[in-house]
Image (cartoon, rainbow, N blue to C red):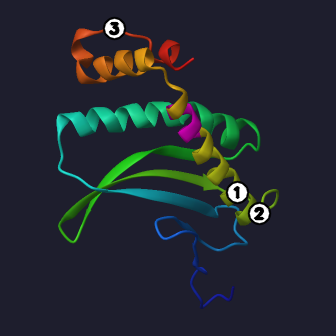
């Protein structure tokens, strides 16, 4: 990059609802962001509880795949935002690429694998585990529960 030009923007579109973006591919500060938009929503206590639940479920697989295996900084969780007055909800994973060791494409593949693992984790919940977690997130102030014990 020359002294007069700004950073190069890398935009790569995967499936329709999933995007990867990062700054200058030669910078150690390069990052990737994958977002799966789940759809429109109306803010509610129930949705807030669900977002907390999803973020809690995402934490461990994201930590395992992105932080400990490749020593990549990451953020994983659910998000809500408003675009043109329409509120949307999505899950997202952001991760630095540390280009000296790991390529953008490799990080993208790791994040996709991480998202697939999270889906398997959700599907593996027994009815009883789901009921306990749902009860906890719906009535947080009434229960003192170790979430991690329910996710094992």
First in sequence: mark 3 or mark 2?
2
First in sequence: mark 2 or mark 1?
2
Q: Quick one: label 2, few (<14), some, or many (20+) residues within 10 Å?
A: some
Residue 125: x and y in percent read: 50, 24
**10 vs 139: above or below:** below
* Residue under the point 31% across and 17% down: 136
Q: Determine whether the residue tagged by mark 1 lies in a helix, strand or loop.
A: helix
Q: Which residue is mark 2?
A: 103
- Does 121 appear in magenta? yes
Residue 29, image quadrant: bottom right
Residue 114: x and y in percent read: 63, 45
Q: Do the residues under discs 2 and 1 have CB atoms within 8 angstroms? A: no
Q: Determine whether the residue tagged by mark 2 lies in a helix, strand or loop.
A: loop
Q: 83 or 100, which lies in front?
A: 83
Q: Which residue is mark 1?
A: 109
* Residue under the point 64% across and 55% down: 96
What's drawn in magenta, residue-wise?
118-122
Q: Which residue is mark 3?
A: 144
């Amino acid at each position: 990059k020359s002294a007069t030009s700004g950073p190069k923007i890398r935009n790569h579109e995967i499936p329709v609802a999933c995007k990867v973006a990062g700054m200058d591919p030669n910078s150690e500060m390069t990052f990737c962001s994958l977002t799966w938009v789940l759809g429109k929503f109306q803010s509610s206590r129930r949705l807030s509880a669900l977002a907390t639940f999803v973020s809690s479920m995402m934490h461990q697989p994201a930590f395992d795949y992105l932080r400990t295996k490749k020593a990549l900084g990451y953020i994983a969780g659910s998000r809500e935002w408003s675009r043109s007055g329409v509120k949307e909800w999505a899950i997202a994973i952001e991760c630095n690429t540390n280009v000296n060791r790991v390529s953008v494409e490799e990080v993208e593949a790791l994040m996709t694998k991480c998202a697939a693992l999270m889906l398997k984790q959700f599907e593996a919940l027994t009815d009883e585990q789901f009921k306990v977690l749902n009860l906890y997130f719906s009535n947080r102030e009434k229960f003192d529960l170790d979430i991690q014990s329910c996710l094992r």
